Structures are given as structure tokens and as C-alpha cells.
Image (cartoon, rainbow, N blue to C red):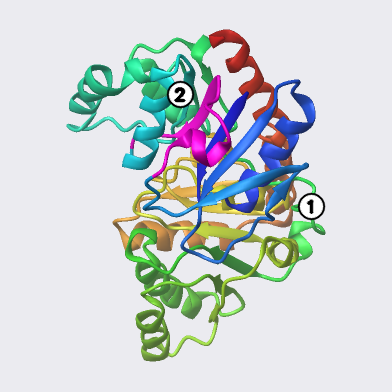
Amino acid sequence: MICIAWDGLASYSEAAIREFIKTTSEEVRIVAILPVVPKTTSDVIEGVKINWIKRDYDGTLAEAAGRSPDVLLIGGWYLPLFNRFTQEVRKNGGKVIAMLDNQFEWNWKLIPWIVRFNLLFRRWYAGYLVPGTCTRKLLHWCGVRDKYIGYSLYTADPAVFTNGGPLEKRAKKMLYIGRFISLKNVMFMIEAFADFSKRFPEWELHCYGQGDLQPEMERLIAERQCKNIVLHKFVQPTELAGLYKEARVLVLPSFWDHWGVVVHEAALSGCAVLLSDRVGAGWNLCTEKNGVRFNPFQKKSLGQALDRLAGWSEEDWRQAQQESLRIAQTISPQVFASELQRLVDVIK
């Protein structure tokens, strides 16, 4: 039996898990920690009931899942609860595959991270499922062979997010989709777009989400008197899909984002992307043809990136749409399912 233990279990996770259940011959059980944001998944995936637990759950994995699994797919070591589940499965003779999304970045923290990983955690896991190139490179630096690394961990649902009309004919609208928190760099984005709006008043920025910074964002928008920035409440994926189809660009200015599933959603919808160079999904889903990357610590860098997009010709927009749709196909629930099955076959 394979148990999938996921923190939060967002809608994109549901699509990937559904595909795996449909294609595997293994029995699958699901344990999920209740999310802190509104739940976006059903309670049953492809006939398999989700066993919801709280973050402070003090029982065993066997109690939550019904019995101890042969293989456990689990989030990394950031949660003590998941670490406890990992040790329980290993003690019972099972194997553990870690879902890992840490980014590779060449700085002074890299070597200590590699040493800590190899000394403390690597022996816990028989394989790894990662989002894409950025985390794969990090594991290569840790000495993990490709054989034990699967990808497409975070995938949007291509049945929900589909291509909209010609990009060059869509309204000059940019979207931010995410939490209104400091890590997402939303105040910086509003400042930069307010300046950009003076140069290009035909463009609008629509922000969808929730978070502690919403009052500050509203205050700044009013202070800058920028009517072209509009804040909206959190929306469900089915509503979000229609919004992408009407927009040209997704903006994600995060100071740090291990991946960013919204980037895949936007690419599936044919949008261009404007990404911080700290967004992990940019390694796989942003090229010179479909987007621009910028330094999230420099407002000037984002301003220049905005100006560059605003100066694109109709042919540039057409090429951007084609490129987004092309590279979006490299990540999918089908790839997730096949990569997870391959890892299971390798480690059993």
C-alpha cells in the first residue's frame, strides 16, 4: 500500500493524485493536514477518502491511514509530524519518498545546507519527488542520482486551466494571484506598478488573495491614487481559470518562492509571465520568449521589466503565448503519476 501524506492538499495536488490513483495498480491511501486557507479540494479523490488530520495530531500514521504503508510519499522535514511519520514507516520496514521543493542558489548557505542534509536527512529517504530543474540541481549537488529523483511535483490541472483567446487581443491586464504577505513582496509590486501606470495608464493590475498586508496594500493604493490597481478576495480555481483567459500577464514578485503553481496555471492559459528571479518555477516555465525575470530587491528592476513587456509588439505577444503553451505541457498530472510510479518501482 502507498500512503500519500500532504500538508494542506491544494487543488493542484488533487489533480496529480487523481491521475496516480487512476494509473497505478497499487492501493492508495491519503492523509492530509487541514489547510489554513479555505479548502479547495473535495474529501474523496477517485474513490479514495482523504483522512484529514490537524497540524497538532498526536496519533500514528497507521491510525490515520488504517495501516502502515509499504511506501510513504511525504512532505520534507519542515514538519515534526511528518518526520514522526517517516520514522514510523522506516521502523516498520517501509520506504519513504520525500516531496522536496528547496531551491538551488549559489550563496554561503549552500554548503552548510548540503552537509546538514547528507548528515541528518538523506538516509531517511529512498527517493525524491521535486517540482523541476531548480530542486533537481540542488539534489545533484548533494550527490543524489537522477534515478532517485522524479519531477512534476507541483502541477496545475490542464483540465481546468486552458488557453484563452489571442494574447495580443486580450485586455492589457496583469494578475497577481497569491497571499498578501511580506514574503510575496506585494508592497514593492504596488509601488512599482503605480509608477508604471503613470507611463502606461492603459494597463491594470488585479490582485486576488488574502493576507495580513491587505490593509497596508489598500492604504498604499489610495495614497498613490492609482485606480488601475484593484484588490479582490480569494477565489476558487474554477473562477480563477476564467480570469487567466482574460489577462495577458501573471506577475509574481516574491522575495522567495520555492515553486509557484500559479506560474503553471498562467502558462496553461497562454499568459506571459513576469517573475522574480527567486521564483523556482521560472527555471522551467519562463524563457526569453514568454516572459521577463527581475530582481525582487530593486524596484527599478521591476519597473524596467514592466516597461519591456509594455513595449512588446503583437508578434511578441503571439510568440509569448505559443511558448507558454509549449512549455506548460512539460509538467502535468500525467507526468507526476508516471514519475511517482517510476520511483516506487525503483525503490521497492
What residue does disc 2 label? 136
On the image, the x and y values in percent for residue 87 come to: 36, 25
Residue placed most toward the observer, 308 or 152: 152
Decide whether residue 78 is among the magenta residues: no
User: Which range of residues does the magenta coloring cover?
Assistant: 59-77
Q: Residue at x 35, y 55 (%)?
A: 296
The quadrant of the image that shows the N terminus is: top right
Tag 2's secondary structure? helix
Question: What amino acid is at disc 2?
Answer: Arg
The quadrant of the image that shows the C terminus is: top right
On the image, the x and y values in percent for residue 202 come to: 62, 78
Q: Residue at x 48, y 51 (%)?
A: 275
Numbered tag placed on residue 163 in the rendering:
1
Near mark 1 (Cα within 10 A), the count class, few <14, some 14-19 or many ≥20, is many
- Quarter residue 234 falls in: bottom right
- Quarter residue 43 falls in: bottom right
Question: What amino acid is at disc 1?
Answer: Asn
Using residue 246 as the reference point, say whether residue 233 is left or right of it. left
Dot 1 or dot 2, earlier in sequence? 2
